[in-house]
Image: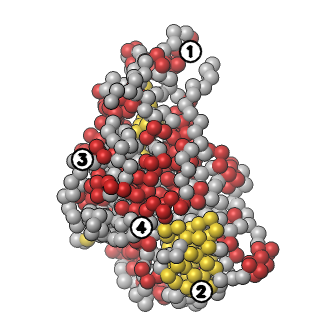
Amino acid sequence: MTPPERKKPQDLRSQQWFGRQDRDGFAYRSWLKGKGIPHDQFDGRPVIGICNTFSELTPCNSHFRTIAEQVKIGVYEAGGFPLEFPVMSLGEVMLRPTAMLYRNLTSMDVEESIRGNPMDGVVLLMGCDKTTPALIMGAASADLPTIGVSGGPMLNGKWRGQELGSGTGVWSMSEQVRAGTLQLAEFLEAESCMHRSHGHCMTMGTASTMASMVEALGLGLPGNAAYPAVDGRRNVLARMAGRRIVEMVHTDQKISDILSREAFENAIKTLAAIGGSTNAVIHLIAMAGRLGVQLTLEDFDRLASDLPCLVNLQPSGEHLMEDFCYAGGLPVVMKEIEHLLHKDLPTVSGHTVAENLVSAQNHDPRVIKPFAAPFKDKAGIAVLRGNLAPRGAVIKPSAATPALLVHKGRAVVFENIEDFHHRIDDENLDVDEHCILVLKNCGPKGYPGMAEVGNMPLPPKILRKGITDMVRISDARMSGTAYGTVVLHTAPEAAAGGVLALVENGDLIELNVPQRALHLHVSDEVLAERRARWSPPQPRLTSGYWKLYTDHVLQADEGADLDFLRGQRGAFVPRDNH
Ligand code: FES
């Protein structure tokens, strides 16, 4: 194979800042020299932007200064010139009303920071849930050579001899407190034991899922998904990414050369094999939309709903990401499903998908199961349709109660999240375990931002019967660390006038996951009458970013991106600023 042509130094876009001998060239170099940069750094070597989502308000990314330093060392080692820059960070636990409201805003920050600045390639430092899709979406629209480096999961949570998974443990323990079977003092003690190191949530929640997607897409180096944040190999991976991005600039290998339709198909199959978060559906569709790759809800069902889950990790299983790492991590999973993958695709490692998997070895079959004897059958995401979700809704059958996957029940309706919180603990609430809980106005426009409230806690009187799952339906998302028979992402959402808005208490709803059906047993005539009486909820803010967001956000089936952000705009060099 002929080696790819190497880009001439004078053709690097950064040279349009630094390679000039005029007034502006003086300015571009001089201001940087003030921080101690020697003149030879401007001589036509690749300038690498390190896009950092460090923030003390994003605890999952709090170690990113260290990771950035390692990337810088790698860039220097390969003869490049690194320049780190911050973008808006999205802390899943802190940011209200939901970090998802700001995913698209951060993506704009990333895209414009890349385009407007002197850089030839970029390394994305990502960890907490939304930071990963936000950075990839922005970088995809700009389309420079790009590598993703995830921050890595935390060490396993440990509490009183048991493993405690991020999120997953919170959901189950808070239910126990509500049911009166766990003391508040014990609950508070567990807080310090669940999160005891740097890193993102260590269940196979959204952050671990998205870090796995980065690796499965070929946008991250092998090992990206599983090395714990505090493992020395995480730093090595960051350093190697610094080296590799310089080479990718030399050979002009852009993010669009990596993120092909086939790469997304590999990611979708891997998503099923890891039992990954439903949030990945929205994020992958949004990322693909930036690249002009057509990806639909049907692709998830068609390509992967029949695939098994191979990993025994919380929230669907027992173990945590640290165990996944010691078992061999994502390369082992991808090797198990290699026969289903596009094997010859390029990846940022400089090797193909198949080459990256050559040395993968399963060191713990309790954590990673073989394809022939999986942890769970048919673990992919199922896409439901029906009059209640004409544009689709999703469910993760592997996290659901099998007996509830075909279920007909009476709707108990909550108009919004405040209504839910206000009434769910009421002992007089007219509900039993056969009912279906319906939550409205939590979608992209309605919340706004499509919050992770779809896994509604059950009424205490049901919990006290020892019942731990009921069918729940909403236009919300669900934390990747959560579980249950939860129908999510119902589209169109209630606030956009979807049929969900018209559901009333006592209506019969039928869920049939094997048949992919979600039906509201109310006649079209009655629905038309209800629609005539319906008016959309009033937004909390009618100006500022929230206004821009609610005016332009797409529905869940289209990735909830802003309509005007889809597609690539490239990294042309804008006009001079002086
Ligand atoms: Fe950041 Fe879970 S809160 S990954």
Residue 358 tag number: 3
Pointer 2: residues within 10 angstroms few (<14), some, or many (20+)? Answer: some
Disc 1 designates what residue? 24
Front tag of 2 and 4? 4
Above or below, 136 relative to 558: above
- Calculate the distance from the C-alpha at mark 1 to the C-alpha at mark 2: 69 Å
Please state which of residues 376 and 55 is positioned toward the viewer in this rendering.
Answer: 376
**Residue shown at 31% from the left, 26% from the top:** 78
Sequence-earlier tag: 4 or 3: 4
Q: Secondary structure at mark 4?
A: loop
Residue 366 in the image: state x and y as whole percent: 22, 67
Can the viewer see residue 66? no
Disc 4 designates what residue? 306
The three-letter code of the residue at mark 1 reads Asp
| Disc 1 Cβ-to-ligand 1 distance below 8 Å | no
The N terminus lies in which quarter of the figure?
top left
Sequence-earlier tag: 3 or 1: 1
Sequence-earlier tag: 1 or 2: 1
Disc 2 designates what residue? 410
Residue 431 in the image: state x and y as whole percent: 56, 88
- Calculate the distance from the C-alpha at mark 2 to the C-alpha at mark 3: 52 Å
Q: Which residue occupies the extreme top position in the image?
A: 21
Front tag of 3 and 1? 3
Pointer 3: residues within 10 angstroms few (<14), some, or many (20+)? Answer: few
Above or below, 331 relative to 65: below
Sequence-earlier tag: 2 or 4: 4
257 on left or right of 78: right
Residue 471 in the image: state x and y as whole percent: 51, 79
Q: Secondary structure at mark 1?
A: helix
- Calculate the distance from the C-alpha at mark 2 to the C-alpha at mark 4: 30 Å
Q: Secondary structure at mark 2?
A: strand
**Residue shown at 69% from the left, 60% from the top:** 540
